[in-house]
Amino acid sequence: MTKPLLLIDVDGPLNPYAAKAWRRPEGYATHRMSPTGWTGAKPLRVWLNPDHGDELLALADAYDLVWATTWKGEANDWIGPPLGLPELPYVDWPRMHGKAPRGTFWKTQYVLEYAAGRPFAWVDDDITSYDHEYVERHHLAAALLLRVDERIGLTRPDFDALADWAAAL
């Protein structure tokens, strides 16, 4: 049987960018990055928790890991190495921040296209009830949409939920 996909957003789940700027979240290290498209005068501040790499690698036994982030393939250059992750495939969004069906997040329609009928779990900080409804109506396979608080990032209960969901398939 084919493993389900684990679609991973960066900003929010792995980089709790909305945490208080003067207080790095516990367990996270500060990284300065200048990905393509970054136009800030200083490199972008990114907080990453090195334990998340181990957690994601442990889930790789149950999932095919995929970047589902606006970082696209650059997640392999900037995010994967500090987390100890191998190069991962990524969703190459046909259009970013564009029009989306009835209140859904712009990524949702493309996530379903990428999944192409496969079961998937998706972690992102922009998932809403509209996205859940859209996936239920348009995706026949199992799907877990896990909204992550962009002030906190992925937590132990999130990793447990992902492992439990995959085990129950």
Image (cartoon, rainbow, N blue to C red):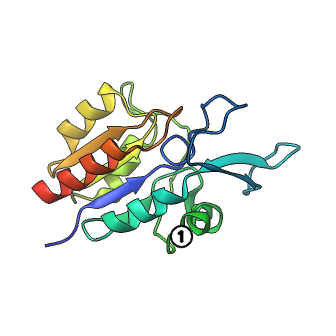
Q: Tell me the residue at 75%/47% (across/down).
A: 44
Q: Is residue 152 above or below residue 70?
A: above
Position of 162 compared to 95: left or right? left
Q: Within 10 angstroms of label 1, few (less than 14), some, or many (20 or more) residues?
A: some
How many numbered marks have been drawn onto this rendered protein structure? 1
Q: Tell me the residue at 15%/52% (across/down).
A: 141
Q: Nearer the viewer, residue 111 or 41?
A: 41
Quadrant in the picture for the C terminus: bottom left
Q: Residue 135 location in percent, x, y?
A: 25, 40
Q: Tell me the residue at 86%/46% (across/down).
A: 42
The residue at the far front in this view is 26
On the image, numbered disc 1 is attached to which residue?
84
Q: Is residue 169 visible?
A: no
Q: Residue 91 location in percent, x, y?
A: 46, 59
Q: Residue 151 location in percent, x, y?
A: 54, 32
| Label 1: which secondary element | loop
Tell me where residue 82 sits by quadrant: bottom right
Q: Nearer the viewer, residue 131 or 113?
A: 131
The residue at the far right in this view is 41
Q: Is residue 146 visible?
A: yes
Q: Tell me the residue at 38%/41% (across/down).
A: 108
Q: Amino acid at mark 1?
A: Gly
Quadrant in the picture for the N terminus: bottom left
Q: Nearer the viewer, residue 134 or 3?
A: 3
Q: Is residue 120 above or below residue 127?
A: below
Q: Residue 143 location in percent, x, y?
A: 22, 47
Position of 87 compared to 168: left or right? right
